[in-house]
Image (cartoon, helix red, strand yellow):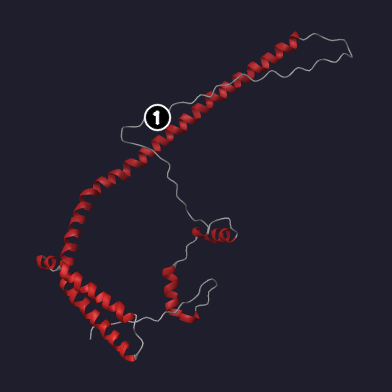
Amino acid sequence: MSELIIAEEEIKAEHSALERRAMELAQNIRTEEDYNIAGEFLVGLKTAMKAWDEKINPVVKAARIARDKALALKNEIRLPLKRAELKIKPALAQYNERKEQERRREQERINAQLRAEAQARQRAAEEERRKTEIILPEGVKREEKPPIPLPEVPQVILPKSAVPRGIFHFDYYSAEVTDLVALMQAVIEGKAPAEAVQPNMSFLNKRASVLKDMLKWPGVVVKRERRVGGRVV
């Protein structure tokens, strides 16, 4: 490992030089000779990659093994704590939600009672006013009086339940697709954004690789790109 660290700058400089040479060759492939030179350079790159991989892979493997062991130990130690967390968090959320529903019901009960009492006072005031009205002779029009307004009703807001220090509650929202066809139709009609339905590119690319130009699906175009491979000879 120390040898690799010492040679790091030298290796980077060498590989940067190869990258610059590749750029020069890529911009000047005009003849068969240029093509052959660039092809031989590509094979040389693959050979250099293989040699570098053989040198660095043992170091990477050792680091991966050490990392995997550390992660396995971490997960083993955390597992009982995680299971405990998964048990206690839903119980806390359910209790808090139950108490919140009770608070809202009680709050609405109190406010409904206050509204009913205010309406009762209004009716009593109207009844009292009718009792004190003078009986007019027949044919004499009574002056219309506006109805007695409903007394102001204060809104009671009960305090929420206290929570332990370090604990907080929040509403988590998530989506579940229950009818994919309906969702797609909503996208077509502009009732939902196109981002709501993402194409499965992994599936599409695999089908294109198998069917090639025979893939004739609406909204899908098969692209063909000429590529070059290289291997160590």
Residue 137 image offset from top left, x and y in percent: 87, 10
Closer to us: 115 or 214: 214
Residue occupying the far right of the picture: 139
- Give the camera-side residue of 202 and 28: 28
Instruction: Name the side, left or right, on which 66 lies relative to 180.
Output: left
Give the mark count. Answer: 1
Query: Which quadrant of the figure has residue 201?
Result: bottom left
Q: Residue at x 46, y 80 (%)?
A: 212
Q: Is residue 7 left or right of residue 200?
A: left
Q: Quadrant of residue 186?
A: bottom right
Secondary structure, mark 1, is loop
Along the viewing direction, whichever of 124 and 25 lies nearer the viewer = 25
Q: Which residue is mark 1?
A: 161
Specify few, some or many for label 1: CA neighbours under 10 Å numbering under 14, 14-19, or 20 or more.
Answer: few
Picture residue at 56% right of the left edge, 21% below the top: 114
**Residue 143 percent location from the top left of the image:** 80, 15
Q: Residue at x 34, y 41 (%)?
A: 89
At a point 30% along the width and 89% down the height, the residue shown is 36
Which residue type does callout 1 highlight?
Ser
Question: Is 6 situated left or right of 161 in this image?
Answer: left
